[in-house]
Amino acid sequence: MDLCTFDDVKNILGVKDVRDDDIIQELIGNVSAEIESYLDRNTQAIARTEIFDVDLGQRRFRIRAFPITIITNVWNDTSREFAASSIISTADYYADLTNGVFTFDKIFVFAGPGVLKISYTGGMAANTDAFETAFPDIVSACATEVAFRYQHRGQLGIVSAALGGGSMTVGLKQQFLPSVEQVLDLHRNLG
């Protein structure tokens, strides 16, 4: 899901018409994906299923898309068939819907690889318009990063240095602008 719009970027660039619509649209997609990766959480609110490995005595699990809007089912099954008989009652766990954390405080879950399955609907917003309403700071940060990369597209990741009669050019991995990173850190999954 794109985390900003073409118009958001044009507003930052201070232009009405841009010749490189395709380049900007590609940058929006790339920066949006990089932001989602940096946040370490899924941004689009859709139905999802996650399967977890469970360590002996483990009681807390964090899903990748939050906030959670619907919990469909939670299963714990060492055979990994996830039949109806392995569904865990909602009374046996606490779900922090805002932060996407499930805590099994009334039962112990069986340990093993891939034995806990959680189906839910979650994510930051259903579409770009809803995202823009809910997270205007991230939208602005995304548009700022896209505008910066568009304006500097010929030099991104390149550093040149002149050394005693010669010069050297080195390619670097692209990083977010410090102001963009500051905004993203407010929404990052650190758990």
Image (cartoon, grey):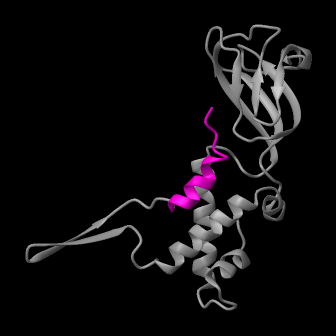
- Left or right relative to 144: residue 71: right
Visible residue check, residue 5: yes
- Left or right relative to 122: residue 146: left
Residue at 90% in and 20% down: 90
* Position of the N terminus by quadrant: bottom right
* Position of the C terminus by quadrant: top right
Magenta residue check for 179 = yes
Residue 9 in the image: state x and y as whole percent.
Answer: 66, 76
Q: Is residue 107 above or below residue 10?
A: above
Marker count (numbered) = 0
Magenta residue check for 17 = no
Instruction: Give the magenta part as a residue range.
Output: 177-191
Residue at 64% in and 70% down: 143
Q: Is residue 57 above or below residue 36?
A: above
Residue at 83% in and 17% down: 93
Residue 51 in the image: state x and y as whole percent.
Answer: 70, 29
- Left or right relative to 101: residue 129: right
The quadrant holding residue 29 is: bottom right
The quadrant holding residue 16 is: bottom right
Residue in the foreground of this view, choosing between 55 and 169: 169
Residue 115 in the image: state x and y as whole percent.
Answer: 70, 19
Residue in the foreground of this view, choosing between 52 and 153: 153
Residue 162 in the image: state x and y as whole percent.
Answer: 17, 74
Residue at 51% in and 80% down: 151
Visible residue check, residue 1: no
- In this view, which residue lies farthest toward the left? 165
